[in-house]
Amino acid sequence: MQQNKMRDDIWQRLQSVKNLQTQPAMVAKITQMLQNPATNASELGEFIKSDPMLASTVLRLVNSAFYGLPGRVGSINHALVLLGFSTVKNIVLSASMLEMFKVDTGSSKFCATELYKHSLACGVIAQYLAQTTGYEQKEECFVAGLVHDIGKMIILQVLPEEFKHVIECADKTKILFYDSERKLLSVSHQEVGGMLVEQWHLPPQIQDAVSSHHNPSPDSKLTAIVHCADVFARVLGYGNGGDDKIPEISDIAWNMLKLGNVNLANMFDDIEKEWQKANAYF
């Protein structure tokens, strides 16, 4: 009964914070534009150019080793043609996410920048896994990996003292952050993150990946990809999600992606190359 009361109280506090329920303004506007079939590259380019910092970010990324395009790209419209609308939207989301992670956590055991690195790595690895396992929506995988742990940042901002206790418990007892928060809060970053991305109107399959990445079902290959990307990012030491544990990979996800047929050493070498390219930019 006490746990149910605590859970209800936490949900009320989370849902009462309006600014956490709003998608970053630039992402929201671009999402709206992309949902309109009449939007063309010129209109989207003009909107991006209205924010000089965003425009320079897009141009830096399109010219980085991460995309490996031949020659220099000097205009936003050219970048849109080369990368496509969806990729540019992901760039905007990545830039907006970075701003959300620029906070003082108040804890020596947790660093928001390290969580951002882990999240970015998860996006990069998820995109790589999509390519190697034949999942066509690789850009979707990048987004799902990037936002999979966003619930942690929301809990940190809304429940700072409780968050600190979760971090301390995970560190002291050597358990996953996920297990620590379920033990102390009766709610997890999966659920909180799922609530947020639903309010951001991200696709249902991304919502499922965020809200179930620790326990994927056999119904979602995207969730399986994000689950494995999360574990691989931990194995390879890319950033830190709030604990030093490496969770076991779900049998469901492992079998769905047919990872038993893969040379993991070669896969990790390829992932390292992709991560170095992304990390050099971000």
Image (cartoon, grey):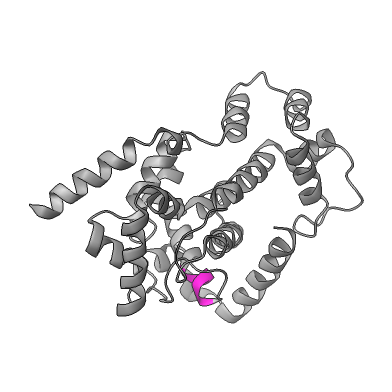
Q: In this view, does 211 lie to the left or right of 237?
A: left
Residue 262 x/y as whole percent: 54, 74
Question: Within the image, what quadrant is residue 113 found in?
Answer: bottom right
Residue 111 x/y as whole percent: 51, 65
Residue 31 x/y as whole percent: 58, 31
The answer to whether residue 29 is seen in the rendering is yes
117 or 184: which is nearer to us?
184
In the rendered view of the protein, which quadrant contains the C terminus?
Answer: bottom right
Q: Is residue 273 above or below residue 99?
A: below
172 or 215: which is nearer to us?
172
- Whether residue 10 appears in magenta in the rendering, the answer is no
Residue 177 x/y as whole percent: 36, 67
Q: Is residue 136 left or right of residue 181?
A: right
18 or 251: which is nearer to us?
18
Q: Which residue lies furthest to the right in this view?
A: 71
- Whether residue 233 appears in magenta in the rendering, the answer is yes
Q: Is residue 108 above or below residue 54?
A: below
Residues drawn in magenta: 231-235
Question: Within the image, what quadrant is residue 168 found in?
Answer: bottom left
For the point 38% across and 36% down, the residue is 17
Q: Is residue 43 left or right of residue 265?
A: right
By secondary structure, the bulk of the magenta-drawn segment is best described as helix
69 or 276: which is nearer to us?
276
For the point 41% across and 51% down, the residue is 151
Q: Is residue 274 above or below residue 82?
A: below
